[in-house]
Amino acid sequence: MSTVLVIGATGRTGRHIVTGLRAAGVTVRALVRTPDLADLPADVELVAGDLQDPAAVRRAAVGADAAFLLWPWFSSEGAAAVVAELPRRVVYLSTLGGGGFWGEIEELLKDRDWTFVRPSGFAVNTLAWAEQIRAGAVQLPYPKAARSLIHERDIAAVAVLALLGEHHIGEIYELTGPEAITQEDQVATIAGVIGRPIRVEALTDSAARDAMLAQGADPLLADSAVTYWASLVSSPEPVTTTVATLTGRPALTFAAWAREHAADFPADR
């Protein structure tokens, strides 16, 4: 395989995918809105354009042997026209279980040579707590909800393997971290790494729903997310061994992620 189009190359997972592909000697092309701000290695081919513009995707896909697809919105609206412009070989970043709009996009890809990478919650999403951590308290729904959070480097490692090997075509990879950890223990882990106490304050269902709506989620997704968090108190997310099986090393722990990202959490004013 000579050229891979990476959609989402400037994101936290995408940058690791770019690194992995370049290390494998693959030519990397990236669709980016603003090339001057992409901050990608000089040998990455940059194509200016928006993912919601099928013509831009068509330009970026010309001559590419495969594509990594990240769909960053809470709806599959417009995805069909974009998928139609991708190369035949696509590795898609879905979600654990493949439900919701992620599943709708999976269906759009079923006539391609696809691989679905389905991670659990991203450890990196806890960076959304950064300003609250600065203030000394994190508000979240169901503090005892346990998630098997995964490091973005593990997602990228599996995605790179899938892009480079044809034997991954038609496979669904359910990826998790090596343990299920409650939200309050996630906060405690970060507190231990940065050396400051952090309180946890439970949000009501309605407050959690409003927070998701403010981030752009539709009401159905917000409702289902709150219901899901509630279920994780008594039924934690599953833990899979897929990362270890595919990469030959254990999945990275949340504590390892927190240590790597300690500088991303602001110090007290």
Image: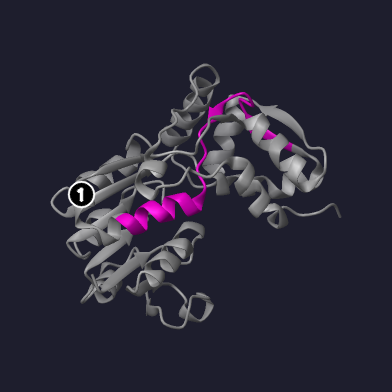
Is residue 240 within the magenta segment? no
Residue at 28 percent of width and 63 percent of height:
67
Q: Where is mark 1, residue-wise?
A: 108
Residue 53 is situated, as x and y percent measured from the top left of the image, at 31, 67
Whether residue 210 can be seen here: yes
Of 207 and 60, the residue lying toward us: 60
Q: Nearer the viewer, residue 184 or 51?
A: 184
Task: Name the image quarter holding residue 207.
Answer: top right
Can residue 78 be seen in this snapshot?
no
The quarter of the picture where residue 98 lies is: top left
Secondary-structure class at tag 1: helix
Residue 156 position within the rendered picture, expressed as x and y whole percent measured from the top left: 42, 55
Residue span colored magenta: 138-161
Query: Would you say 235 lies left or right of 6 here?
Result: right
139 in magenta: yes
Q: Is residue 166 left or right of residue 126?
A: left
Single out the residue that lies furthest toward the front: 248
Residue depicted at x 53% and y 76%:
39
Amino acid type of disc 1?
Leu
Q: Which residue lies furthest to the left in this view?
A: 111
